[in-house]
């Protein structure tokens, strides 16, 4: 008997079968249902011939999980982990291991989506409410939001808020020059895009300007602690807003800016347990006055009630934001940093106010000891007060001291030849201080830490007496109950149990691409070699990062066809903004800076018009025809009408209607003929990878949502990454960085994110995915994504009209089903269907985007036929229920759709309904086998907005 050859047993392509849900037999069965002989034939029917590639991408063969991890480990070990005392907004921190394992490394937390379906998201909504409370308490403000992308972009959002609400009619924004350089760069960039003027000056000159707002930092980038009150008063005297970037840990000990009169207080929550990760991801906090709530950027979690009158959480005031207000939105924020905000809030829950005080006091005390020791050695300090950062005068010695420090594996902040900065953090110890003293003053410095400590304790060195925090914080029970690991573990688990994530069921959210986030892809992100690097370390310490990012850029260039990649934007929407800025700068470079019209099809995602507004573009809408395609004649007309001033078109491909427009090349040509550029929204790249390339089709620039197509998990609403690919002519105009200059973009370009490569530490996820799949795996993935969507469209099409389809009646990787006719006949709405799906254990598809009254379903390639069939079964059962309402078997109020979702409280309480308990909670036999119980009943949205409450309930609410 002949045996199998070794080569056939090695299975380097085994991961492809792990990532792709349906196996060969299931694919065959689905193709049969569609009446197509092969996957190739389906693709030929679906993707326009004019864009379909035949060749495999030059990405190499698939590789095994073990091989890829060992290769990446080798790459990662080229990073050198030094103790970074650089400061500048990034600090060493200790992620409590109970949070590391049960949140950061737990798919129950990291694979959830933004809580648009709050009844199955109460866990992360509670964690985010805690984050808001943490932000409110530490800043001393009235209201906080649930995370922005980073400190620098939060500063830019603060400026934009100031412009919206300030009574001052000035167009000038003041930036204190003692802010972090990356913050100044991002704000200056945003101001220029908005058409605001900025001045960067010392605060002493503030009175020379008339401004609509001013930005200060507390403590300053040099570590100084100033009383902001007189400055804030000056700003208020001008009817302007005072915005304060604050260090979250320092606020444990300092008078909060809110008590000094600040209008907006924001900053990074990184040092609350989130690794530096070479720049991110981290959550920014953002707090302001209650009066400005409608002007706030990003998401706010609010308290409301469910149909039983129980407390329930949801996203509040959504009408402020891009998905509803489009070009009138406060910001373009969609994906934010939910997972990281949750980690920071758990860090505060675990340590509690007393634990945080000990941490902050220890950091401050070690800094004071270091300050006293250096002073005793004759080294002068330029900041008289400090929390954790010292700026030291070392005339002519800076380079030599930095070299000594590096030999001791410590990074200092090199300010200039005569000045150094040093910041301590939660990870600092006596040894750190000893090492630093030796670096500055030589091994024979002769300082005794105990003696210094006694001296410091007596003198109270560091924080000015009148800026010592007096007010209590984190007094709510949640911050005072879970300090043992057992209690904490159970608290985390109790919240996780309330949330439906990908480890429970498919999440068929159209446009969001909720595919597998494979464990192997996730493993590297918590390696210390990736986690513990400060973003501003010397480049030679980050060789591993450089190699991984270079390789990922090369992969993405091959996949998209672009010439260059800019890795900075932290979300798709930030990519849009970054891309539009590049287009703007390109036109300016050709003396065509007047080009400012941005054409956007009506089907576009809300971030498109919101981003266009941020780049001061004039949005001109282009109609769509009855098939959901861009109306090419309307486009031609509008392009011609605006030819003089045409800046660009923003177009999503395949379209948000879920079809491959046949006319895409022509559309791009029309724009180019009129001197415009094509911005391709790459959110739907999962339907293009390996089949077509944005740059080949005619795009000049496009973002890639690495958290959709390239497997970064959605984290419950972030993190994400939205790098942009550009053609060569735009490459000089993408973002650069003021601290870590990048090769390629023009040196004078400002940044769009705080960190040079955005959220660098999650890039290994996308790298790993592409490496595992190889060229052939990626092609199969796209093909199966299309197969799964068409199978669903076919199986659901009779019960629910599929709104749009392309050639041969095929959809792309997602499809829209229309609930409006059913609603007209039965009164049952898309929302009822969405909530009823929860009773089956499913997350709803995307509701009412891009068309109101519809559901958009995107199964992705990772869902097996078995799961698709369960979903189909659920949807058909729901359709039958709708018929019973339609026929009058059930009344409009007394039916399982209107009352969905059903909770345990429903079926254990009084039951007087026209349908059984069984029908309510086990509508199909298979549901019982893996029942997911929504923790609350349907939530009242209107009540929540009318009675806006965005903090943890007061202590009295827990009594009795
Ligand atoms: C998701 C999405 C965006 C926004 O991307 P974020 O990463 O969430 O900022 C933009 N356009 C479309 C079509 C999308 O689906």
Image (cartoon, rainbow, N blue to C red):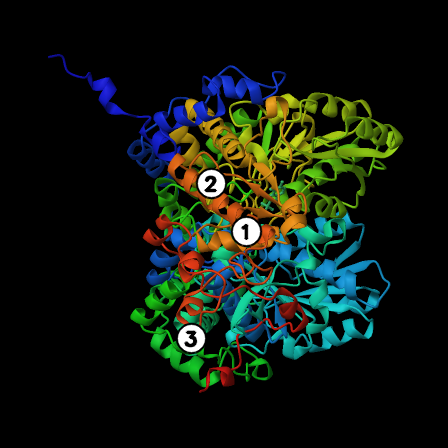
For label 2, the residue is 872
> Is residue 496 or residue 437 the one in the foreground?
496
| Secondary structure type for disc 3 | helix
For label 3, the residue is 352
| Secondary structure type for disc 1 | helix
| Secondary structure type for disc 2 | helix
Which numbered disc, 3 or 2, marks the residue closer to the eye?
2
For label 1, the residue is 884
Number of on-image labels: 3
From the top left corner, tell me how far across and down residue 692 is, in percent.
57, 23
Mark 2: give few (<14), some (14-19) or many (20+) Cα within 10 Å. Answer: some
> Is residue 680 or residue 310 the one in the foreground?
310
Mark 1: give few (<14), some (14-19) or many (20+) Cα within 10 Å. Answer: some
- Of pointers 2 and 1, the one earlier in the residue sequence: 2
Does any portion of residue 810 appear in the rendered image? Answer: yes
Dividing the picture into quarters, in which one does residue 216 lie?
bottom right
- Of pointers 1 and 3, the one earlier in the residue sequence: 3
Write down which quadrant ligand 1 falls in: top right
From the top left corner, tell me how far across and down residue 306 is, in percent.
54, 69
Distance Cα–Cα, label 1 vs label 3: 53 Å
């Amino acid at each position: 008997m002949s045996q199998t050859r070794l080569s056939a047993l090695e299975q380097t392509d085994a991961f492809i079968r792990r990532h792709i849900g349906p196996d060969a037999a299931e694919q065959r069965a689905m193709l049969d249902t569609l009446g197509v002989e092969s996957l190739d034939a389906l693709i030929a029917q679906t993707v326009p011939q004019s864009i379909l590639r035949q060749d495999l991408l030059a990405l190499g063969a698939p590789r095994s999980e073990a091989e890829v991890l060992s290769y990446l480990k080798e790459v990662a070990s080229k990073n050198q982990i030094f103790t970074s005392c650089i400061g500048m907004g990034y600090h060493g921190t200790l992620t409590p291991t109970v949070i590391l394992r049960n949140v950061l490394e737990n798919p129950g937390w990291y694979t959830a989506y933004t809580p648009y379906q709050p009844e199955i998201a109460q866990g992360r909504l509670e964690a985010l409410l805690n984050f808001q409370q943490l932000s409110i308490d530490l800043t001393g403000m009235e209201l906080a939001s649930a995370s922005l992308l980073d400190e620098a972009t939060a500063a830019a959002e603060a400026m934009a808020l100031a412009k919206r609400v300030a009574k001052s009619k000035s167009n000038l924004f003041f930036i204190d020059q003692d802010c972090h350089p990356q913050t100044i760069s991002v704000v200056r960039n945003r101001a220029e895009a908005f058409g605001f003027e900025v001045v960067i000056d010392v605060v002493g000159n503030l009175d020379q300007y008339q401004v609509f707002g001013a930005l200060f930092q507390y403590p300053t980038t040099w570590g100084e602690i100033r009383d902001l009150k007189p400055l804030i008063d000056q700003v208020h005297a001008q009817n302007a807003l005072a915005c304060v970037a604050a260090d979250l840990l320092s606020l444990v000990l300092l008078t909060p800016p809110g008590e000094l009169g600040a209008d907006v207080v924001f900053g990074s929550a990184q040092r609350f347990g989130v690794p530096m990760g070479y720049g991110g991801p981290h959550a920014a906090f953002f707090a302001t006055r209650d009066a400005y709530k409608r002007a706030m950027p990003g998401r706010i979690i609010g308290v409301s009630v469910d149909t039983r009158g129980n407390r329930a959480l949801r996203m509040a005031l959504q009408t402020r934001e891009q998905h509803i207000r489009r070009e009138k939105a406060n910001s373009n924020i969609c994906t934010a940093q939910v997972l990281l905000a949750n980690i920071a809030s758990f860090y505060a829950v675990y340590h509690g106010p007393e634990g945080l005080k000990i941490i902050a006091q220890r950091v401050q005390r070690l800094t004071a000891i270091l300050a006293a020791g250096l002073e005793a050695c004759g080294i002068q300090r330029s900041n008289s007060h400090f929390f954790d950062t010292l700026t030291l005068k070392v005339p002519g010695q800076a380079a030599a001291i930095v070299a000594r420090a590096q030999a001791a594996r410590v990074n200092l902040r090199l300010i200039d030849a005569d000045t150094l900065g040093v910041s301590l953090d939660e990870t600092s110890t006596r040894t750190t201080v000893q090492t630093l003293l030796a670096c500055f003053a030589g091994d024979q410095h002769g300082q005794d830490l105990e003696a210094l400590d006694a001296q410091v304790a007596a003198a109270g060195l560091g924080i000015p007496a009148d800026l010592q925090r007096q007010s209590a914080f984190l007094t709510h029970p949640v911050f005072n109950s879970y300090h043992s690991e057992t209690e904490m573990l159970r608290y985390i688990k109790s919240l996780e149990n309330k949330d439906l994530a990908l480890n429970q069921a498919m999440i068929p959210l159209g446009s969001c691409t909720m595919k597998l986030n494979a464990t192997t892809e996730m493993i590297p992100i918590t390696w210390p070699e990736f986690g513990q690097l400060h973003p501003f370390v010397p480049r030679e310490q980050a060789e591993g990062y450089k190699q991984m990012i270079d390789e990922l850029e090369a992969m993405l260039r091959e996949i998209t066809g672009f010439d260059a990649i800019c890795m900075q934007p932290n979300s798709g929407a930030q990519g849009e903004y970054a891309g539009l800025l590049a287009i703007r700068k390109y036109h300016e470079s050709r003396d065509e800076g007047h080009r400012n019209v941005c054409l956007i099809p009506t089907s576009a995602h809300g971030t498109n018009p919101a981003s266009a507004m941020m780049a001061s573009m004039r949005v001109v809408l282009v109609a769509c025809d009855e098939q959901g395609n861009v109306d090419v004649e309307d486009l031609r007309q509008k392009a011609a009408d605006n030819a003089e001033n045409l800046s660009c078109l923003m177009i999503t491909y395949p379209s948000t209607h879920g079809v491959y427009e046949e006319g895409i090349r022509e559309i791009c040509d029309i724009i180019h003929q009129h001197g415009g550029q094509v911005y391709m929204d790459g959110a739907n790249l999962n339907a293009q990878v390996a089949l077509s390339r944005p740059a080949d089709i005619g795009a000049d620039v496009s973002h890639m949502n690495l958290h959709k197509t390239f497997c970064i998990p959605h984290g419950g609403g972030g993190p994400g990454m939205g790098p942009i690919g550009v053609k060569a002519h735009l490459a000089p105009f993408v973002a650069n960085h003021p601290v870590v200059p990048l090769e390629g973009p023009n040196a004078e370009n400002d940044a769009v994110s705080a960190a040079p490569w955005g959220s660098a530490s999650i890039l290994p996820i996308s790298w790993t995915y592409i490496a595992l799949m190889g060229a052939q795996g990626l092609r199969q993935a796209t093909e199966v994504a299309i197969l799964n969507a068409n199978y669903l469209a076919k199986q659901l099409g009779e019960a629910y009209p599929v709104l749009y389809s392309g050639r041969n009646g095929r959809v792309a990787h997602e499809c829209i089903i229309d609930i409006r006719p059913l609603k007209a006949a039965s009164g049952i709405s898309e929302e009822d269907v969405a909530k009823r799906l929860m009773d089956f254990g499913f997350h709803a598809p995307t509701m009412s985007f891009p068309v109101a009254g519809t559901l958009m379903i995107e199964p992705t390639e990772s869902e097996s036929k078995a799961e698709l069939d369960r979903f189909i079964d659920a949807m058909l059962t729901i359709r039958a229920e709708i018929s019973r309402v339609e026929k009058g078997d059930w009344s409009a109020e007394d039916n399982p759709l209107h009352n969905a979702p059903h909770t345990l409280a429903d079926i254990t309480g009084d039951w007087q309904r026209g349908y059984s308990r069984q029908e309510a909670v086990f509508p199909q036999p298979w549901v019982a086998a893996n029942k997911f119980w929504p923790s609350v009943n349907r939530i009242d949205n209107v009540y929540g907005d009318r009675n806006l409450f965005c903090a943890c309930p007061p202590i009295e609410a827990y009594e009795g």
